[in-house]
Amino acid sequence: MSDRRVLFACDLDSQVFGALPLALAFEARGWRPTFAIDAGRGLTTSAAERLGGRFEIIERSLGALALDEAALGSDAVGVYATGSRVLLFRHVCELAARALERPRPALFCGFNGLVLGRFEEGVAWRLGYDQICLNGPRDRDAFAAFLATTDFSGQPAVITGLRRRPDSPLRGLKPPPEPGRRKVFVFAEQVAVPGDPRRRGELVAALARLAAASPDWDVVVKARVRPQEQTFHDQTHHVEHLVAKLAVRPANLLVSYAPIDGLLAAADLFGTISSTALFDALDHGVPAVLAADFGVRNAHGTHLMLGSGVSVRLGELASLDDAPRRRPNPRWLDRVGYGPAHSAGALIDRLEAFDPTAPLPPALYGFDEAARGAAPSGRYSAPISAAREAAEAALAAGDKAGARAALGKLGQALERSDRQRAMDEAWRTREGKGARYARRLGLYGTYKALRTRLLGEFPS
């Protein structure tokens, strides 16, 4: 058993889901994974259930975590967060290692599931890590084309694949359900796909029609998060509310917050529009359909799903008994990164051979740009940059004590920034007409101050 430790720094549940398969792969190789969850946000119910007590969980300010012994004392740190926060972590960790005169951990980062858009923008924020994790050949080719003629063409990257349960063997399709047995269709909804309220209503109506037309099936809508819980995208028109508003709700149309693994264990068919949960279904051997009712739209990720060979229009199915039972096209699966040829093994090999004295690869954006992107406003980024400048000046003067004191101020500034960011994002999902009106009048700052005085920093 290895005594190597890997820390996964995550700021939202989507990032936890993206890092979890890697944690399972590290554990299988004898590493000890820990998850650091951004303080002030906590875990959504679904994320907590997926971790399931299997891994140690700590709460830290994501920015200040780069200065913490939990990170600096690890052999490797995987940072799964929004782009500017990923890069700021890299800059802060590198500065801390120099100021404290200690070896730094290996740093890697990646993407939380299928990359449906803005891939190049995401790569740009991640440049400068020891390793950037990519899903499969599709992402590898786009990565190489993006950087081929730049100063960053030597940026290390590694394919880690899209298996969701790399600790279990690949499975073939489940056998068809036995005659007379009640069947289960699990549909994984997505917070922002589709994002338009009318389209979301149409999707729920299509599922309700299929439920009514398939009385020997249970149609289970797997909700992404509970109402008011935060995820990577702001949620509008929660699926539970849309189902409740149906004029006639079939008794076999259910909304579930149960863990996806348990739902898939009982499922006979899986559906979604473009959720990475497709690969959870494949790991369980469940045949899948991808809803193509809204056409090919990059914003929905359906441009990527078209080649899968399992796209159907839910509105054209007479009942769920008419849904095809098949796996996606094997060439498409290989291209996106699902299958035995794609795993985290190469990443772990590289991290086990890591030289802590090696310099980090060059980053596209500097410290101050990362701070401005990660902080909620200039009021919070300015102290971060000032503390960094003080630390660099002390290091240049050979003042070790001054450098460490500046690191302490940097940690405090990062914690304040992260706390304000968490507060703003928690309130954003609950703000109504008053907040919108205050924004239009340019009085949002006054509105926030009054809200904090009356209701507290975080919504109840």
Image (cartoon, rainbow, N blue to C red):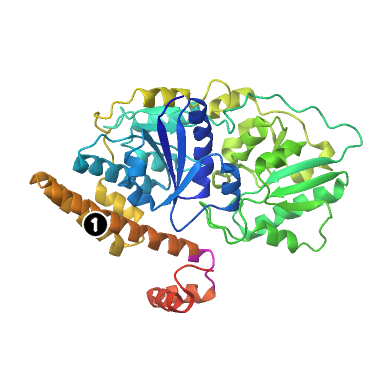
Above or below 264: residue 356: above
Quadrant hosting residue 278: top right
The magenta segment: 427-432
User: In the rendered structure, does residue 429 fall within the stretch colored magenta?
Assistant: yes
User: In the rendered structure, does residue 125 fall within the stretch colored magenta?
Assistant: no
Q: Is residue 223 left or right of residue 359?
A: right
The secondary element bearing badge 1 is classed as helix
Q: Is residue 156 left or right of residue 41?
A: left
Which residue is labeled 1 in the image? 409
In depth, the one of 209 and 243 nearer the eye is 243
**Which residue is depicted at the point 29% across and 64% down?**
379
Above or below 445: residue 22: above
Query: Which residue extends farthest left?
Result: 397
In depth, the one of 346 and 434 nearer the eye is 346
Image quadrant occupied by the C terminus: bottom right
In depth, the one of 299 and 225 nearer the eye is 225
**Which residue is depicted at the point 79% across and 52% down?**
253
Above or below 239: residue 323: above
Image coords of residue 346 (percent x, y): 44, 23
**Residue type highlighted by circle 1:** Lys
Image coords of residue 401 (percent x, y): 14, 49
Image coords of residue 199 (percent x, y): 66, 55
Above or below 329: residue 113: below
